[in-house]
Amino acid sequence: LRFFPPVVTGSVITVIGLSLMPVAVNWIAGANPAASDYCEPTHILMAALVLAIILVIYRVCRGFLRQISVLLGLVIGTLIADALGMADFHAVGEAAALGITTPFAFGYPVFEPVSCLAMTLVMLVTMAETTGDIVAVTEIVDKPMTESMLTKALRADGFSTALGGVFNTFPYTAFAQNIGLIGMTGVRSRYIVAVCGVMLMILGLFPKMA
């Protein structure tokens, strides 16, 4: 903790946010640089419209509607895109109604020294990000950070990464964007987070819904 004063925490989260901006810009442009309609003005206008809808809902509405402004912006934007013929739902039709993830679908783990060293370095960076996120959350919710809290958070991060590997996914990491959502919505209950986690797990069993 002594290596993470506010200036370090803020810098880490800011750098992570800046590094993610090119991803968002690429999605706005159309995600596939090889596509003929990549960077079409309609894509940029749609993104600007969704952003405007979110900001208007956030500024005008109060209570629950304000808290779900991002979700409402995505839903309204999708409906508009569908009406304009910009949405493609064929993948939903092709997806299975029920899907069960097979553990170790790509084989059992192999521990190679060089790979382990590389992943250790990656996880050290992830630990730094998680530490910055946790410290930021404690400041937002006005709950002093303790060594025990941070230890539990890092253990949970490590456990979820290992569990994700069993179910064939990339390593998990804390997301700085979610810190912004906590500050923006004011929703701070860990029980709500737990319920959302259960909902996501259920959605994972139904590919069409997911």
Image (spheres, helix red, strand yellow):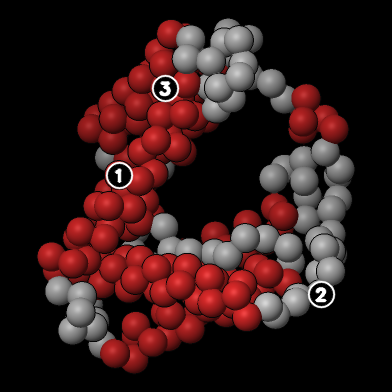
Q: Are marks 3 and 2 in contact (CB under 8 Å)?
A: no
Q: Which mark's residue is nearer the viewer, 3 or 1?
A: 1
Residue that appears at 42% across and 22% down: 47
- Please state the horizontal and vertical placement of residue 122, each as a whole percent of the image: 47, 68
Q: Quadrant of the C terminus?
A: top right
CA distance for labels 2 and 1: 36 Å
Q: Is residue 5 left or right of residue 30?
A: left
Residue that appears at 34% across and 71% down: 128
Q: Is residue 209 left or right of residue 126?
A: right
Q: Is residue 176 left or right of residue 116?
A: left
User: Can you identify the residue that label 2 sits on?
Assistant: 108
Kind of residue sitting beneath label 2 = Tyr
Indicate the secondary structure of the residue bearing disc 1: helix
For disc 3, the neighbor class at 10 Å (few under 14, some 14 to 19, many from 20) is some
Relative to 163, say whether 30 is above or below.
above
- Please state the horizontal and vertical placement of residue 10, each as a whole percent of the image: 19, 60
Q: Quadrant of the N terminus?
A: bottom left
Relative to 188, say whether 50 is above or below.
above
Q: Which mark's residue is nearer the viewer, 3 or 2?
A: 2
- Please state the horizontal and vertical placement of residue 76, each as a whole percent of the image: 49, 24
Indicate the secondary structure of the residue bearing disc 3: helix
**Which label was assigned to residue 18?**
1
Query: Which badge, 2 or 1, comes first in the chain's sequence?
Result: 1
Indicate the secondary structure of the residue bearing disc 2: loop
Kind of residue sitting beneath label 3 = Ala
Nearest the viewer among 164 and 36 is 36
For disc 2, the neighbor class at 10 Å (few under 14, some 14 to 19, many from 20) is few
- Please state the horizontal and vertical placement of residue 81, each as a whole percent of the image: 55, 16
Kind of residue sitting beneath label 1 = Leu
User: Can you identify the residue that label 3 sits on?
Assistant: 47
Query: Which badge, 3 or 2, comes first in the chain's sequence?
Result: 3
